[in-house]
Amino acid sequence: MSYLKTLVTASFAAATLAGSAFAQNVNPNVNAANLVNVNISNVANDIARNLSIDVSNIPVTVQAPIGVAATVCGVQANVLATDNRGGQAECEASSTSQALNQIVQRQIGG
């Protein structure tokens, strides 16, 4: 069991380092238990600028894979994974990334 926990933690850490690549390969049908609710209100202006859209089109929250959420929220992926049992993890973005921009763009249908 310890080996499995180590393997899972290492996988999440690798996903954190490869946030952009990880998000580009996200299956839209990913199990909600692998997603984190990310409050993006603090970076909405940056995302709107990056996507060349009006900030009023940016949602308050999006669901992002654990690796992407860890990167933009400045939280270790293994912490989010532990908090995410049952798909309940949440964090506040303090930065944006190409991966997060793509998730927002997909959510708003752009």
Image (cartoon, rainbow, N blue to C red):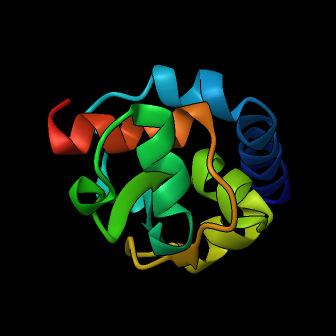
The foreground one among 4 and 57 is 57
Determine the residue positioned at 54% across, 34% down: 99
Q: Position of residue 50 (x, y in %)?
A: 50, 36
State left or right for residue 29 relative to residue 11.
left
Please tell me in which quadrant of the rendered image residue 29 appears: top left
State left or right for residue 94 relative to residue 105.
right
The foreground one among 38 and 55 is 55
State left or right for residue 29 relative to residue 70.
left
Q: Position of residue 41 (x, y in %)?
A: 45, 73
Please tell me in which quadrant of the rendered image residue 78 appears: bottom right
Q: Position of residue 5 (x, y in %)?
A: 76, 57
Determine the residue positioned at 48% across, 42% down: 49
Does 8 appear above or below 17?
A: below
Does 8 appear above or below 86?
A: above
The foreground one among 77 and 63 is 63
Determine the residue positioned at 60% across, 67% down: 93
Determine the residue positioned at 33% across, 28% down: 27
| Image quarter in which the C terminus is found | top left
Q: Position of residue 80 (x, y in %)?
A: 64, 69
| Image quarter in which the N terminus is found | bottom right
State left or right for residue 77 relative to residue 88.
right
Instruction: Count the marks.
Output: 0
